[in-house]
Image (cartoon, grey):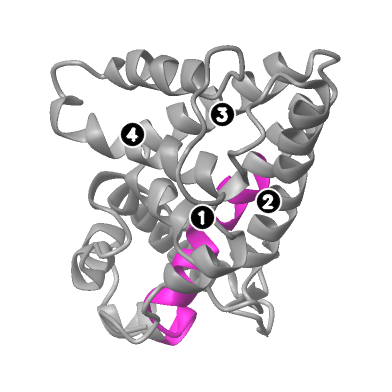
Amino acid sequence: MADGETGGRTLPALRSDARRNRDRMIAAAREMFAERGLGAPLEEIARRAGVRVGTLYHRFGGRTGLIDAALADRVEAAARLAETALACPDPWRGLVEHLTEIARWQAEDRGFTEVCVHTFPGDLAIERAKARGHELTRRLVDRAHRAGVLRDDVGLADIGLLVWAVVRATEGIHAVEPEAWRRHLGVVLDGLRPETAHRLPGRPLDPDRVRAAMAYPTNAGGR
């Protein structure tokens, strides 16, 4: 995201001291979101950055604007991962490598994990980047379906929630077994293969309904 943009707003160019403050706030937010998730206290983020919380609100408008500024680049990088996966000539390997890397990022960064599952206002850079990533990942899933290497009763939203569930399920033991998610992701990936699959109840989850259900509460914790 450009220096003069946040939360869909275009802001005037920053003086050097204001730019340093902004950079410190973004760095502190990235660290705390990674450690504690998107609900990390804004007052503590400001303290870690060496500024007053009022400065943070003035610069970013509150929590949602700060999330956008701090994590949009991370989400854009995730979309580029999907581009790389699409370049893999093997549809199954491309999908597996992409899902594995996304799971690794989620295991290392709680804020990124929550950004992946929550929906934000459409005018934010973070949501635009997510939309691009979703479209590229949908193409990965569609390609795997066409190749017959992915069971046809599982859709993109199902897969996204399964990866998230693996990471969350192993979160409690991350300190002693930081790679535990890999084992459980392997079980999930085996379950996505069609060879010995049993038909699942119901239909694949609808991505639009899932996004609506997972809307991030922008009025919580100081927007």
Q: Residue 66 lies in magenta, yes or no?
A: yes
**Where is the C terminus found, in terms of image quarters?**
bottom left
Give the image quarter of residue 222.
bottom left
Q: Nearer the viewer, mark 1 or mark 3?
A: 3
Instruction: Indicate the quadrant where residue 127 lies.
Output: bottom right
Name the residue beneath numbered marker 1.
71
Q: Earlier in the sequence, mark 1 or mark 4?
A: 1
Q: Quick check: 124 left or right of 52?
A: right
What label does residue 167 carry, if any? Answer: 4
Q: Which residues are magenta?
A: 58-77
State whether residue 114 is above or below residue 53: above
Determine the main secondary structure of the stretch shown in magenta: helix
CA distance separating discs 1 and 3: 19 Å
Q: Indicate the quadrant where residue 206 lies.
A: bottom right
Check contact, mark 2 vs mark 4: CB within 8 A: no
N-term mark: 1 or 2: 1
CA gap between label 2 and label 4 equals: 19 Å
Q: Residues within 10 Å of mark 4 (few under 14, many from 20)?
A: many
Of residues 111 and 26, the one nearer the viewer is 111
Residue 139 position, x and y percent, is: 79, 40
Q: Residue at x 70, y 17 (%)?
A: 92
- Label 1: state its secondary structure: helix
**Amino acid, disc 3:** Leu
Q: Which residue is mark 2?
A: 134
Give the camera-side residue of 222 and 117: 117
Q: Compute the Cα span from label 1 to label 2.
A: 16 Å
CA separation, marks 3 and 4? 12 Å
Three-letter amino acid code at disc 1? Leu
Which residue in the protein does label 3 denote? 99
